[in-house]
Each structure stands twice: as C-alpha cells, then as structure tokens.
Image (tube, rainbow, N blue to C red):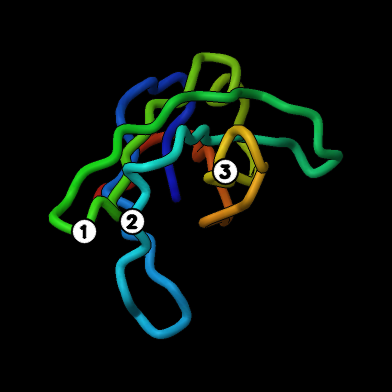
Amino acid sequence: VVTYINVVSAIGLIVVTDSGGNAVGLSTFTHMVSIEKVDRSILANVTPTVSGAGNNQVTFTPNADSVAKTGTYRWSLRETSSKTVYALGDFVVDPAARLS
C-alpha cells in the first residue's frame, strides 16, 4: 500500500483470498494490522474494518507515528490470539501525493 507523509486516512480496500483465489472469511476472528519498520519495531497496531459479501475485505487507518516519516515499512493483517498472518506487504510513505 502507498500513503503520504502526515496523512492519517483510511487505506484499502484490501481483498484477502487464499491460494486458490477464494475469499478468506475474516468475520469470526479479532484482527489487527501491524505496521513495522524493517528491524521489526512496531509503529502501529490498529484495528481494521472487515467488509464485503465474503467478509474478506479490510480497510485500516494508520496512526500518526506510522506516517510521520517517508520510507518503506511492512504491514501485516493478523488474528490477535493466534498471531496467524492473513495478508502482508509493503507500507510505503511517500513525501507527497503524485500528480498524473
């Protein structure tokens, strides 16, 4: 995902599917999105919003700390009790919005 420095607004829609392309239902668990630096130090743990017909779509809003500096970090969607990872990727904080 890509966001911009000092912009705290919703990110998504992120669609979670299994290796066969089937929806992974997320409504029966409590989840968190972690945003981490490369050294694995945590910038944010936030609660995502789950939506969609298959309950496999998430959005989340990063906190101010996670967008305070430009860089490439990591995000992951985890179930809170088992720490099972359902989705992950780069979390890029760009200096400013790009105009096309």
Residue 25 circle label: 2
Q: Nearer the viewer, residue 29 or 8?
A: 29
Q: Residue furthest left?
A: 53
Seen as rendered, the residue at the extreme bottom is 20
Q: Is residue 5 left or right of residue 28?
A: right
Q: Position of residue 13 (x, y in %)?
A: 27, 49
- Of the two numbered discs 3 and 2 on the same chain, state the one appearing first in sequence: 2
N-terminal of the pair, mark 1 or mark 2, is 2
Check disc 2 and give the amino acid type. Gly
Q: Nearer the viewer, residue 84 or 70?
A: 84
For the residues labelled 1 and 2, the Cα–Cα distance comes to 6 Å
- Name the residue tied to disc 3: 78
Q: Residues within 10 Å of mark 2 (few under 14, many from 20)?
A: some
Q: For residue 54, which numbered disc appears in the image?
A: 1
- Which residue type does callout 1 highlight? Gly
Q: Using a 10 Å C-alpha cutoff, classify the residue at mark 3 as few (fewer than 14 neighbours), some (14 to 19) or many (20 or more).
A: some
For mark 2, give the secondary structure.
loop
**Under tag 3, what secondary structure?**
strand
